Amino acid sequence: MRAATCAAPFARLADYLDGKLAASDQAGLEQHLAHCASCAAHVAWLRLVTGIMRADHSLEAPQATIQRAIALKQRLRPQPGLLERLVAALVYDSRSQLGLAGVRQSPTSSYQLLYRAGELDIDLQLFPRASGHWDVLGQALPAPAGLKVELWQGDSTLASAPASNYGEFRFPSLVPGQYRLALYTGQQQVDITDLVV
Ligand SMILES: [Zn+2]
């Protein structure tokens, strides 16, 4: 008999394991198991499961195990409506490339900052105005669809800007100070926490 077509009833295999079959049946099945990989696998599985259940002495254990498995699965899958929050790391500051021995470029010249968070690169160009205010031009790449950028200072939102299709955004005429940018991509919130203009 081919293993793939064998369908010995589970109850019969369970009875065999429990020693509930008549002696001749028991011997016959034993002989069958020696040649049928399918039934042998079922018996091995039954032996494992009944062994676990006997060792556990608890009927609620399987249910608890299922609940744990479901909880784990949900943790692995991002919950809709819950944003993954990342803090972007500064990877490039054009001001630090210019000076030798700590000499810095005049703070009235434009400069560039590059941040990275996961797969996202955020490029910031800062341009001074004659008034002493600064314009911030930013671009997030690869450009996330529907990107929205918020400018924060302390606990307040100062401005909110939708990005272009190329991931570009702009905050004009900022007073020098410390800011935070929050980029909302739909699945992620990416923060630039240490933006000093
Ligand atoms: Zn079989």
Image: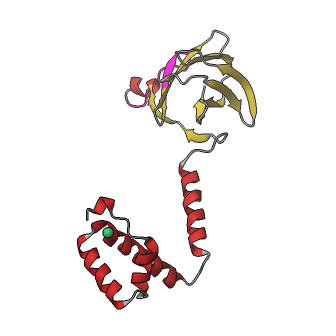
Judge whether residue 106 is colored magenta: yes
Residue closest to the eye, 149 or 12: 12
Residue closest to the eye, 181 or 97: 181
Report the residue that reaches farthest toward the left: 35
**Relative to residue 159, is residue 10 drawn left or right?**
left
The relative height of residue 101 versus residue 112 in the rendered view (above or below) is: below
Residue 20, x across and y down, in percent: 43, 88
Report the residue that reaches farthest toward the right: 156
Residue 80, x across and y down, in percent: 64, 41
Q: In this picture, which residue range is highlighted in magenta?
A: 101-113
Residue 44 found in image quarter: bottom left
Count every numbered label the image shows and give the total. 0
**Residue depicted at x 67% and y 11%:** 131
Residue closest to the eye, 171 or 35: 35
Residue 92 found in image quarter: top left
Residue 5 found in image quarter: bottom left
The relative height of residue 150 versus residue 191 in the rendered view (above or below) is: above
Residue 29, x across and y down, in percent: 32, 79
